[in-house]
Image (tube, grey):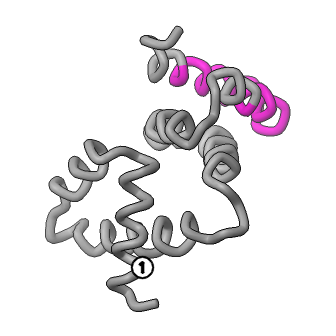
Amino acid sequence: MSDEDRYDQGMAIRREVLSNAHVDRSTEAATELTQEWQDFITRVAWGDVWARPGLDRRSRSIAVLSSLIAHGHHEELAMHLGAARRNGLSLDEIKEVILQSAIYSGVPAANTAFRIAGEVFADEL
């Protein structure tokens, strides 16, 4: 697969998972400094890894949420909580991922994750 094909595949997946609005904001905000980064994450993260057949998108979202909680990447967590819903996770399943993360990543990490989830899903609660 060519770089252009990987980019196109990655952009399609990225838009499906993160939403057109988010991707448009990211790509429109790209500068001379960040343009190559946007190309890289579209080709590699989305066009290679997210496109692999070994896990479905629900499973990938569970893995991403767990990793983001564990490493304290709160801005990415907020974005990927919405992505997890688009990938089919229910609020109860997201709650279970956060509870599971508390055991392995710590109570403070879960406290923060629940706070962020409450903000992201305020209109659903």
- Is residue 66 located in the magenta-colored stretch of the structure? no
Q: Depth check: 98 or 62 in front?
A: 62
Span colored in magenta: 97-117
Q: Is residue 102 visible?
A: yes
Residue 2 location (% of width, % of height): 40, 91
Which residue corresponds to the image point at 15% horizontal and 64% vertical from the top-left? Answer: 31
Residue 78 as seen in the image, left or right of residue 60: left
Q: Depth check: 85 or 112 in front?
A: 85
Residue denoted by label 1: 6
Task: Give the main secondary structure of the magenta stretch.
Answer: helix
Residue 73 location (% of width, % of height): 53, 42
Which residue corresponds to the image point at 42% horizontal and 79% vertical from the top-left? Answer: 6
Which residue corresponds to the image point at 15% horizontal and 70% vertical from the top-left? Answer: 32
Badge 1: residue crowd in 10 Å (few <14, some 14–19, many ≥20): some
Give the quadrant of residue 10.
bottom left
Amino acid at dot 1: Arg
Q: Is residue 72 visible?
A: no
